[in-house]
Image (cartoon, rainbow, N blue to C red):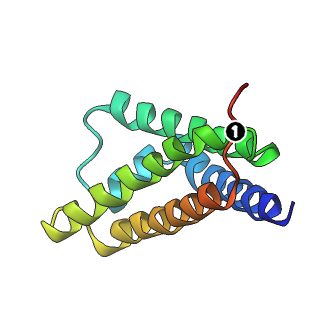
Amino acid sequence: MIKDRFSRNVFLLAGIYGLIVLLPGYFGEKTLAQKMPPAITHPEFYYGFLGVAVAWQVAFLIIARDPQRLRPLIPAAVLEKLTYCVACAVLFISGRIPIIVALGGAGDFILGTLFTISYFRLKPAQAAQ
């Protein structure tokens, strides 16, 4: 049960943190365009990304309720984190994003690592007999 508590806390904190970080984005398109020009030219991609990211935060909160039962979903959660941190690393190395954006990818790397640890700490479901 202690392992379960670790996983519950990891996913709960990830979901809450993600919602706190992402939800203001629905009201910040103009501010983003001013602070990090150019302006967004394809708002459907911007808001589409936000919607998918917010949906994943809700999934993390759902996983937090019963990580043992939802263990098969955890690799997808790791992939969600991995894709963003790898994209940030590649874009930063190629000089296409500033360090502050790359650090957001580092946060996803940390969470992805904690998700991976959670996955291996939880026991696989017993094979159906």
Residue farthest to the right, as pictured: 1
The answer to whether 68 appears left or right of 53 in the picture is right
Q: Which amino acid does label 1 sit on?
A: Leu
Mark 1 highlights which residue?
70
The answer to whether 15 appears left or right of 25 in the picture is right
Q: Residues within 10 Å of mark 1 (few under 14, many from 20)?
A: some
Q: Which residue is drawn at 44% across and 33% down?
A: 47
Residue 101 place in picture, x, y as percent: 36, 65
Tell me the quarter of the picture where residue 49 sits.
top left
Tell me the quarter of the picture where residue 44 sits.
top left
* Location of residue 87 with respect to 2 vertically, above or below: above
**The C terminus, quarter of image:** top right
The answer to whether 97 appears left or right of 57 in the picture is left
Q: Residue at x 64, y 59 (%)?
A: 118
Residue 64 place in picture, x, y as percent: 76, 48
Residue 125 place in picture, x, y as percent: 70, 40
Tell me the quarter of the picture where residue 58 sits.
top right
Q: Residue at x 52, y 33 (%)?
A: 51
Residue 62 place in picture, x, y as percent: 74, 39
**The N terminus, quarter of image:** bottom right
The answer to whether 107 appears left or right of 114 in the picture is left
Q: Residue at x 75, y 46 (%)?
A: 68
